[in-house]
Amino acid sequence: MRTNRAIMGLAGIGLALSVAGCGNAGSETSDTIDVEVSEDAASSFDDGTRMKELADSGEITIGVKYDQPGIGFMPAGADAPVGFDPEIGKILAASLGIAPEDITWKETISDNREPFLQEGEVDLVIASYSITDDRQKVVGQAGPYYVTGQQLLVPSDSDIETLDDVKGTEVCSVTGSTSLDNIKNEGATPRGFDTYSECVDQVLDGTVDAMTTDGAILLGYAAEHPDELKVVVDPFSEENYGVGYSKDLPEMCAWIQDTLQSAEDDGTWGEAFDATLGKSGVDTPKPPAMNDCPAA
Amino acid sequence: MEAVFSNFDEVLKAFGLTIGLFVVSGIGSLVFGALLAVFRVGPVAIMRRAALVYVSIFRNTPLLMIFIFIAVALPKLGYNFRFIGDVEVGGVSASPFFFRACLALTLYTSAFVCEAFRSGINTVPLGQAEAARAIGLTFGQSMTQVVMPQALRAVIPPLTSVQIALLKNTSVAAAFGITEAVANMRALSNENTSQTAMIFLLVAVGYIIIVEVVSLASYGLERKVKVAAR
């Protein structure tokens, strides 16, 4: 009888825990972090800066990807995107005194990130946006807040083990992406598709031999199909993800860098990583060091 | 400007692929579309109806959907056409991706070609076909020797429009594994963000040149088959 009661007790605790878990965004491990929204943020910025304007208005528009699990992904029926990029957005908004629910999210695809910033359609672009010299000619890029590298996603029974093995194979990625260009230089036939999910389908169907892009994205898909897919090859490129801002507002750089730096120092950055990309089983990496802001 | 010209061989190769898609699907759609048109006006009720159903389905479906069906849905059902890569014709072998793109473009364009041909056939007075049958020609003979040659004159302008639409529709293949002109443009503009506008403009000029060549050929053909003024 006593054992029975003990089991009942345990079951009760288990039930209570699972109910508590439900209250927390419907899953046991939350896929978002609690950010500390700074109060009276407006007073900490100089008059005439864009940060002051944003803090005063209490609203900010951030462009993120909607189709990259772990990085920036909009689940069907959800109100806000989830992933590491939106978390970085929440951290930046919080430093302006803007709560996560007051952020307006906007989907950006690779092609429209620069126009969106130039036309003021969005205030920030946080969309797996690699920092490159050419992009910095037209927009500002602060950071990096994450460093990743290109890898390969292959079927579990694939013969592709090293980068040399891709010669003569067909490798899928998103049309026009840098990853596709890199793999072409390795001797593979590039196969561009519109979205990453279509690419994953092509790998699963055996229509292409592999898929390639930044390792973080691939790990997300491998986690969805652990029996059929695996990520191979050491990263063979270095992508530094940065936060895009308009070149007309150079004052934003220092604010973005400082906010990211303090998030890295106080552990918020690590929490954001664990809640999103970290779920695919990778260890939390060392946060990257910030670049210098261009002289205004 | 320089982004396009320093990668000019890539750009030319991409436009070559665009032209390749256009030529193969163009010929395919002309042959299949003409056949459909003959079914459409033919004496056999079941064929008339089958052609009508075909046209209704493929003319009323967006091209993108047909592409998605062939490139994404069919492989799921086990038809990925990989065997195409093993078929060699004169040492040249088409990739399964090229084949799938041509298949989608041909199926789609054939419906429009069929209707263009039918409009041409309708311009031939019914008396012509009746006279042809009256002197003992079979349906096939009256079609190939009396009706179609006359219909061809009226059909060149609308058929040219259909083929030009096909040429531009090849750009849909950019999202299905073919590095044609638009896919190449997107790669270039991704690498050279500061020159995006110029890259778009130059690729557009490329399309305009190819379409202009097709139009000129069509005008030439029109003049050649024109009935001499009496």
Image: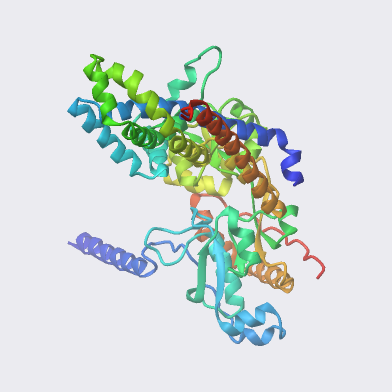
Q: Nearer the viewer, residue B133 or A285?
A: B133
Which residue is rendered at x = 60% and y = 41% of the image? B207
Describe residue A254's horizontal placement relative to residue A61 as left or right: right
Q: Is residue A96 depicted above or below B49 in this figure?
A: below
Which residue is rendered at x = 56% and y = 49% of the image? A216
In the rendered image, residue A84, in percent from the top left (x then y), is placed at 55, 60
Q: Nearer the viewer, residue B50 or A118?
A: B50
Residue A122 occupies quadrant = bottom right
Q: Nearer the viewer, residue B79 or B144?
A: B144
Q: Quadrant of the N terminus of chain A?
A: bottom left
In the rendered image, residue B81, in percent from the top left (x then y), is placed at 42, 26
Residue B121 occupies quadrant = top left
In the rendered image, residue B214, in percent from the top left (x then y), is placed at 56, 34
**Residue reaching furthest front?**
B230
Describe residue A1's horizontal placement relative to residue A241 as left or right: left
Q: Is residue A115 visible?
A: yes
Residue B156 occupies quadrant = top left
Q: Is residue A133 depicted above or below B169 in this figure?
A: below
Describe residue A137's horizontal placement relative to residue A60 as left or right: right
Q: Is residue B46 depicted above or below B135 in this figure?
A: below
Which residue is rendered at x = 30% and y = 26% of the image? B38
In the rendered image, residue B16, in percent from the top left (x then y), is placed at 61, 30
